[in-house]
């Protein structure tokens, strides 16, 4: 009887989360998968159970070009953000005082008070052929360089979206590392590099991996940066969804692309969680 009461109490507190996930995640996901089997006739969808949408999309070379391009750009964005953020996070966690760290986290969050689209368009002005960067380079007799409508500009957009979050997550993770273990490593003769990669990084790996996977997820599904900064050609998967819906109202084929994106992101997320919380 007591066991039933404990289970009922736990279920009561879990029920809102289960309802929320069912309504806003599981339900739409199931509906999106179902749409992939619909057919479009005369610009109208009708219910069917046909694999034609999957066959047409997965047999097209442009889909796989977009798929691997999106995967590559998201991976490059994740590696860049992780590497660039680590020195700043390390300094905030181990060199700065608690007050400075709190203010730094606050200022890192401030950019999110502004629309991501606005921040992206600010880079559009900076990276333009006659923008701020090329103006500075012209003083040294360099340029102008074409930076817009390139993968470089897309990565800049991804950094605008992800880098502050990665710095915050890495800082919080590194700040929780036991300082006694670091001192023990120094007392045992470990150098700076060995202490960082042999002690600090393994102890903070959960936060580092979570920060990286969040950056990957945001970059993989982003539409703004590759469209407005990258030029949308070749298209990423998010742009391909828009293009597909505009082509004869092919929502079922766009749903195929979306389901493939979701499957990839779920696989990456579960792999990252396994690596983050795996214990030897």
Image (cartoon, helix red, strand yellow):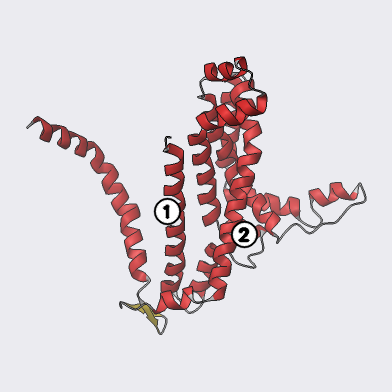
Q: Looking at this view, is 171 or 124 the one in front?
A: 171
The residue pinned by badge 2 equals 226
Crowding at dot 1, Cα within 10 Å, few <14 / some 14-19 / many 20+, comes out as: few
Q: Measured from the top left, where is residue 41 in percent x and y?
A: 39, 84
Proximity of marks 1 and 2: CB atoms separated by less than 8 Å: no
Residue 164 shows in this picture: yes
Q: Residue at x 76, y 56 (%)?
A: 128
The residue pinned by badge 1 equals 266
The residue at the far bottom in this view is 42
Place residue 130 in its image quadrant: bottom right
Q: Nearer the viewer, mark 1 or mark 2?
A: 1
Q: Residue at x 65, y 55 (%)?
A: 154
Q: Measured from the top left, where is residue 193 in percent x and y?
A: 66, 28
Q: Looking at this view, is 107 or 149 the one in front?
A: 149
Q: Measured from the top left, where is residue 219 in percent x and y?
A: 56, 52
- Identify whether 151 is placed above or below 133: below
Query: Viewed as shown, does residue 72 lie left or right of 258?
Result: right
Secondary structure of residue under mark 1: helix
Q: Residue at x 50, y 67 (%)?
A: 241
- Identify whether 173 is placed above or below 275: above
């Amino acid at each position: 009887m007591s066991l039933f009461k404990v289970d009922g109490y736990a279920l009561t507190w879990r029920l809102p989360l289960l309802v929320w996930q069912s309504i806003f995640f599981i339900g739409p996901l199931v509906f999106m998968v179902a749409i992939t089997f619909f057919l479009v006739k005369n610009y109208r969808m009708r219910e069917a159970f046909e694999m034609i949408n999957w066959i047409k999309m997965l047999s097209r070379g442009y889909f796989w070009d977009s798929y691997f391009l999106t995967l590559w750009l998201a991976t490059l964005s994740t590696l860049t953000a992780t590497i660039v953020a680590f020195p700043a996070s390390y300094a905030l966690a181990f060199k700065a005082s608690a007050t400075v760290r709190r203010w730094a986290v606050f200022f890192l969050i401030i950019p999110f008070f502004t629309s991501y689209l606005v921040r992206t368009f600010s880079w559009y002005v900076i990276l333009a052929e006659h923008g701020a960067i090329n103006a500075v380079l012209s003083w040294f007799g360099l340029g102008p360089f074409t930076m817009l409508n390139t993968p470089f500009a897309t990565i800049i957009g991804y950094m605008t979206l992800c880098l502050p979050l990665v710095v915050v997550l890495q800082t919080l993770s590194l700040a929780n590392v036991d300082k006694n273990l670091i001192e023990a490593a120094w007392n045992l003769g470990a150098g700076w590099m060995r202490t960082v990669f042999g002690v600090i990084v393994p102890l903070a790996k959960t936060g580092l991996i979570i920060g990286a996977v969040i950056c990957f997820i945001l970059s993989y599904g982003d539409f703004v940066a590759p469209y407005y900064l990258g030029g949308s050609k070749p298209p990423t998967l998010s742009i391909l969804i828009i293009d597909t819906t505009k082509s004869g109202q092919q929502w079922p084929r766009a749903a195929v692309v979306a389901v493939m994106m979701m499957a990839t992101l779920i696989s990456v997320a579960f792999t990252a969680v396994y690596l983050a919380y795996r214990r030897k």
